[in-house]
Amino acid sequence: MIIIIGASKGIGKFLLHKFRSESITVVGTFNSASDNSDNLFKVDVTDFNQIKAFIETQKPLISDITLINCAGITYNAFAHKSDPALWKNVIDVNLIGTYNCIRAVLPLMRLQKFGRIINFSSVVATKPTAGVSAYAASKSALWGMSKSLAQENAGLNITINNINLGYSELGMIKKVPQEFLDTLIGQIPSKKLCEPIDIYKTVNYLMECNYINGSSIDLNGGLV
């Protein structure tokens, strides 16, 4: 069973449809954006009790769990001009929210002695731009968390890994003005944005391989 957190748009929505087209049991969540056409569950990842309640409703279906954490927000502002509440909200969603989702499913994974956890980190953790300190902090923090959790759970056939995603056709790149987007693509050695199918292939690889654990895979077209 695949659980996709943040499945109402972008990467999460693409993966939801892709796996469902393969007749795999997939459930997804949304928070603020959904037209209900995908039969998603409304969950605020910053509220652990909501996540726990959602997982409880799925217990009769749950086995061989893969958790894919796609929920994320960004906030662009120079630190000295930033709103502390908005800055903290990025951490709450991207980092604390990811932890909450993992915390809710780990007991079941440990009981079943199987689990795959895949988080979406970002190239900005190593190649940041000005104004994204909150987003960069939230995404780089996933690395340390994943390494620690791998130590705790690897003996039970549970893996936790990150995909350090570069600039993709599905991500927040849609908010970038065209003139800046052209410049950005020019800096990518492959001279193109990441295609959705490459994200799917990377996720599928991490699902199938049980010896990659506590790792982060760069999916960025050679951008360093």
Image (cartoon, rainbow, N blue to C red):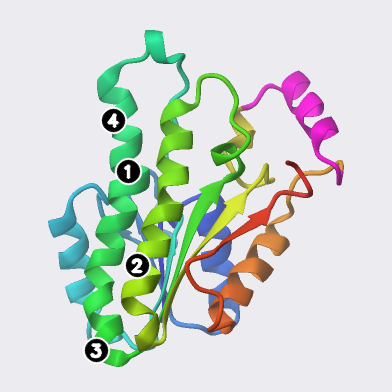
Query: SS of the residue at dot 1?
Result: helix
Residue 183 in the image, given as x and y percentages of width and height = 80, 24
For the point 47% across and 44% down, the residue is: 140
Of the numbered discs 4 and 2, the one sitting upstream in the chain is 4
Please state which of the two labelled residues, at mark 1 or mark 3, is closer to the viewer.
3
Give the alpha-carbon distance from disc 4 to disc 2, as whole Å.
23 Å
Residue 32 seen anywhere in this rendered image of the structure: no
- Residue at the spot of label 3: 111
CA separation, marks 1 and 4? Answer: 9 Å
The disc placed on residue 190 is none
- Residue for badge 1: 93
Distance from disc 1 to disc 3, alpha carbons, whole Å, reads 27 Å
Q: How far apart are marks 4 and 3 (CA)?
A: 34 Å
Question: Which residue, given by chain and number where applicable, does mark 4 sit on?
Answer: 88
The tag on residue 149 is 2
Q: Is residue 3 above or below residue 73?
A: below
Establish if 163 lies above or below 32: below
Mark nearer the viewer, 3 or 2: 2
Secondary structure at badge 4 equals: helix
Of the image marks 3 and 2, the number of the one nearer the N terminus: 3
Labelled pair 1, 4 in contact (Cβ < 8 Å): no
Q: Residue 212, how many percent across, how many down?
A: 56, 75
